Image (cartoon, helix red, strand yellow):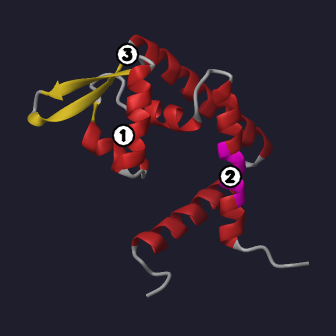
Amino acid sequence: MKEVTIDYVLRATWQAVARMYNEQAKTYDSTMAVGFTLLSIDPKTGTPSTALGPKMGMEATSLSRILKSMEDKGLIVRKPNPNDGRGVLIHLTDFGLEKRMDSKNAVIRFNEVVRTHVPQEKLDCFFEVMDTINKLLAEKKIYD
């Protein structure tokens, strides 16, 4: 049997999760990317458009396309930022808030099902390993 690498398990699992979320989002005439964006926008105060990309780990070009699509579907509106005359705040519409709840429920459901099948001690270990990997990456300790 071949040894399974950490990066393979991470990638394969994330692709399976993304596929699951996209299949679920399709039932709401949406995509995982739109759902993730809805969850990243502050439902009360809106979110500066310049803060969304870094918050989501996305390139500005990809995010611009998603935001344009969301605006066309009536999920968001862009408003001038009162604290920064050059900036724009992304706000959810009532329809956007409704779709945000659908996205939130999908994430909650996934977490609930996993938690019923994995003991808390193992989840604690999982989060500890993920935290360590993220720290190693952030500190650029992999290839230095």
Sequence order check, earlier mark of 1 and 3: 1
Task: Find residue 51 and report its horizontal and vertical position in percent.
Answer: 29, 44
Residue 13 to residue 8: above or below:
above
* Discs 3, 2 touching: Cβ within 8 Å: no
- Is residue 110 visible in this depiction of the protein? no
Residue that badge 1 annotates = 64
| Of the pair 109 and 27, the residue shown nearer to us | 27
Q: Is residue 122 left or right of residue 63?
A: right
**Separation (CA) of disc 2 from disc 1:** 23 Å
Q: Is residue 127 left or right of residue 95?
A: right
Few, some or many residues within 10 Å of mark 3 (<14, 14–19, 20+): some
Query: Of the residues shown, which amino acid type is indicated by label 3?
Result: Thr
Q: Residue at x 42, y 52 (%)?
A: 57
Label 1 vs label 3, nearer the camera: 1
Query: Of the residues shown, which amino acid type is indicated by label 2?
Result: Gln
Sequence order check, earlier mark of 3 and 2: 2
Q: Residue at x 41, y 16 (%)?
A: 74
Badge number at residue 93: 3
Q: Is residue 111 left or right of residue 34?
A: right
* Discs 1, 3 touching: Cβ within 8 Å: no
Few, some or many residues within 10 Å of mark 2 (<14, 14–19, 20+): few
